[in-house]
Image: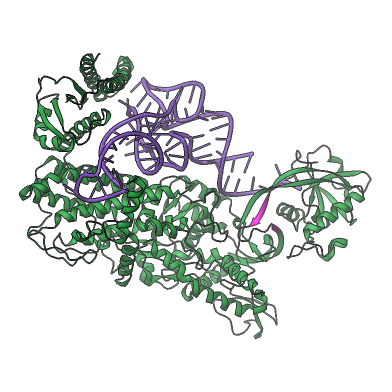
Chain colours: A green, B purple
Amino acid sequence: MSKEERKEAAEEAAFSGQGPEESENFLPRGYSPREVEARWRERWERNRTFTPVAPAEGEPFSIVIPPPNVTGNLHIGHAFNLTVQDLLCRHARQMGRTVLWVPGEDHAGIATQNVVERRLAAEGKSRHDLGREAFIARVWRWKEEYGENIRAQIKAMGASVDWSRERFTMDEGLSRAVRRVFVRLHREGLIYRGDYIVNWCTRCHTALADDEVEYAELPGKIWNIRYPLEEGGFIGIATTRPETLPGDSAVAVHPEDERYLGLIGKKAVLPLLGRRLTILADSYVDRSFGSGALKVTPAHDRNDWELGLKHGLECIQVIDDNGRMKENAGVFAGLPKEEARKKVLEALEEAGLLEGEREHVHNVGHCYRCGEIIEPHVSTQWFVAVRPLAEKARAAVPAETRIYPDSWSRTYYNWMDNIRDWCISRQIWWGHRIPAWTCRGCGELIVEEEAPAACPRCRGKELEQDPDVLDTWFSSALWPFSTLGWPDSGGDLETFYPTSVLVTGFDIIFFWVARMMMMGLHFLGKAPFREVYIHALVRDAKGDKMSKSRGNVINPLEMIAKYGTDALRFTLTAFAAMGRDIRLSEERIEGYRHFVNKIWNAARFALMHLRDETGPCPEKAGEGDGGRGWSGENPEAGLESIPGTHHEWILHRLEETKRAVPAAIREYRFNDAAQELYKFVWSELCDWYLELIKPDMQAGGLPREQARRVLLAVLRETMLLLHPVMPFVTAEIWSALSGFAGGVSPDIALEPYPAARPACIRPACAGRMEMIQAVITALRTIRAELNIAPSRALRVLIRPADEDRAAVLEGHRSMLVRLARLEELRLERKGEAPRPAAEQVAAGNEIFVSLEGVVDLPAERARLDKELAKLEKERLLLQGKLENRNYVEKAPAELVERDRRRVAELGAAEEKLRGTRQGFMP
RNA sequence: GGGCAGUUAGCUCAGAUGGUAGAGCACCGCCUUCACACGGCGGGGGCCACAGGUUCAAGUCCUGUACUGCCCACCA
């Protein structure tokens, strides 16, 4: 049977549940995440496991979920985000804190509206065919229909959120909060309405905030155009947008530009239209770019708008909100702007005013929702004057809120320092309608939380509500307190605000984090989070940012289906230290699925041995109805006094891991936590400890009882350590183990973090174990490199380095014999080496493996040469160091001493090996 | 233009307070050892981008260079 065939056969057996062990054990042979996860999800939900009960003493722990788009799909970024939050929540629960994790969804104004509009378009209709009310009703239906989708996906990740507190940005409570905030800011003069040049999407037909515009470099052209001067001659102007020419209201040059000094204050004539344009001076103009003269079009360029304000220029709109030329564009009226560009150029050409063109790459803004090129557009919009809010928000970091990693603080400050007023009105229908009404009678503007019955000034009844809705981020900005009940006080708001930590990607630091800080501080007087953890952004295969609407999302559900949620979560956790740019590879998830399976099988092994044929055993996995002790005694008591280096060692390592993991989590070093766990479980518990107790298990009697007690304790606590990262497999195993541990809770999610056992911290013992491991590894290496069949037992002489080591090795004779497969082991400090023999030095001990009957002299000679070279290289390196007087004098004495000992050891080892090699010469 | 990251094994990436380089996958050899072939044991593979500097000692600190990526601003 080939390797492949065997693999297939094994998979088949596991899949069909027909594995050879099936009837012998109560955990199936292979871990099948699908079934286990469904069962625990259902159970946690049914039992409301994650609804916090009355706050215990001590500080509660709370997180509000970054709300995903209600009709969106979970992408890998969400999966990562959720994993981190869930890890923190589950860990905090273990630490005894009252934990609230609030779930919810965002109405995602433009994105959701776009989706529904696309649907309509497929039916050949537009939103205008339905009318506002019917359209909104349709979006709500869509939301009801598809909202369950994202909810199920959050559940699939194992997120321990409290579903009884789920919120939606458009639900009644949150909408009330939105109106309250709007009205209050308006009364405080921090919300105002005005004309402004905004980023306009001619397709979405709405204004966009600056950070909703995405820039992309596109090849374009710069045209040089001659503007005739009133007094004769020309002035050369460079432009990338000739179609805006009809909207020019001035020409600008640099005040110190010698070429144009004489022209300042004079007039130029606008080509094709003949309007007189003042030539003004402003230091904004870059003398070195183009001709150094600039046409000023306040209505269609951000910078020109600023210039226009400064110099009191006329603002002439020539492109309408659909991207077509208006009537005042003369002969170009009615043309789409792209057409107009061609026509303008043709006309200039004809008039002999086009001097030339050249290639030019420039950054063009695009709508982050639909990708359409953004048109600067002057219109009446609502704004938040954010300066006063931003000052407070800036000062709160790091005093009130610490940002991790700290480097992001700088980005945060930078943004706060350069902040511009926030345009919050959007010309769409899906969202929070702006609570402002205009009186038809007297024109009074009324801003109220609820629709007023009549105009307070003229008593008129004809009031018209502002048609616009608020930027989605406006309601998002209130999320940390609106979800906790604000504007009502008390309750959750009192208990859980400020929240403990916000977990989010850096891509929405400005959109969201900064604004939550501003609103939280302004309305509650406290920053909304004590800490902000900024994690890496998961990008798609090409390294592009994934976004809700761009459609380049990767579906983690596929990964879950293939490898299980725990494998995905562990992978993401192991990734979580990289500052940025995560590109998730499927192979890696697959690799960690092996880890999950390894854990599962370690548990199967334990259960097999824990089953005491003289005592009770649980009936079934997953139900854990045992409740009876497995051998009468409290299995946890007196672990530290169980003799046996292997027991002491694993308990010692367990204690170290128990300390290291929370330390890493506290500092958001999730990858370190994952690595620590991985190494402990696989390389130590499975590779060594489980092998070491097999003889104990076979021996029966007291050794077996002792091994079982240690194994049970270690495995249970290991499950607790793993649980925040891998909730499902640990819950299942915990439940299966619970029958052996004296009637404890079968739900690991409610278990406290294991208490430290100071008596089990024994570094000296760990050192002994490591020495034995080194000897065993040396023996295995000899076997492997000399191609000695695994079935062949070895005859070995070990010359221990000293009496201490001799005693330790003697004390673990059976361990050595078993794990290195020996048939004879002599431990003699002066023992005579067998000839021929393979030799190796491990931890100072000289090891000889008799090669009688397995002679492969050339192989052994080659091996010895390799070994010698390795030793010599290391020795020379260290000797070089020690010959350096500076090193010897300045480095810590213990380090120098260590190196000296090592050199001596190496020298001795080399000498021994050389001696042996002599014997191998042909 | 300004700022910030990254550059470590074939690939994807870890390497906190400076002390002889690690993981996963891939690769090579042996093994159907009674938890696991999603496994076991062993192995090969890296002058840690480059150039200087600080230090007894630098992947790790400093300066500069070269690529790559991101963020912010934007030049008509």
Asked if residue A810 lies in the magenta stretch, the reply is: no
Q: Residue furthest front?
A: A1
What residue lies at 47% left-to-right and 67% top-to-bottom? A105
Q: Position of residue A149 (x, y in %)?
A: 46, 68
Q: Position of residue A184 (x, y in %)?
A: 53, 70
Q: Is residue A311 visible?
A: yes
Which residue is more in the foreground, A531 or A416?
A531
Q: Is residue A725 visible?
A: no
The number of discs equals: 0
Q: Is residue A713 left or right of residue A417?
A: left
Q: Is residue A633 left or right of residue B61?
A: left
What residue lies at 53% left-to-right and 74% top-to-bottom? A142
What residue lies at 57% left-to-right and 61% top-to-bottom? A549
Q: Is residue A489 left or right of residue A383?
A: left
**What segment carries the magenta color?**
A364-375
Which residue is more in the foreground, A263 or A270?
A270
Q: Residue furthest left?
A: A701
Q: Position of residue A775 (x, y in %)?
A: 19, 31
Q: Is residue A402 above or below residue A874?
A: below
Q: Position of residue A594 (x, y in %)?
A: 33, 50
Q: Quadrant location of residue B14?
A: top left
Q: Quadrant location of residue A852?
A: top left
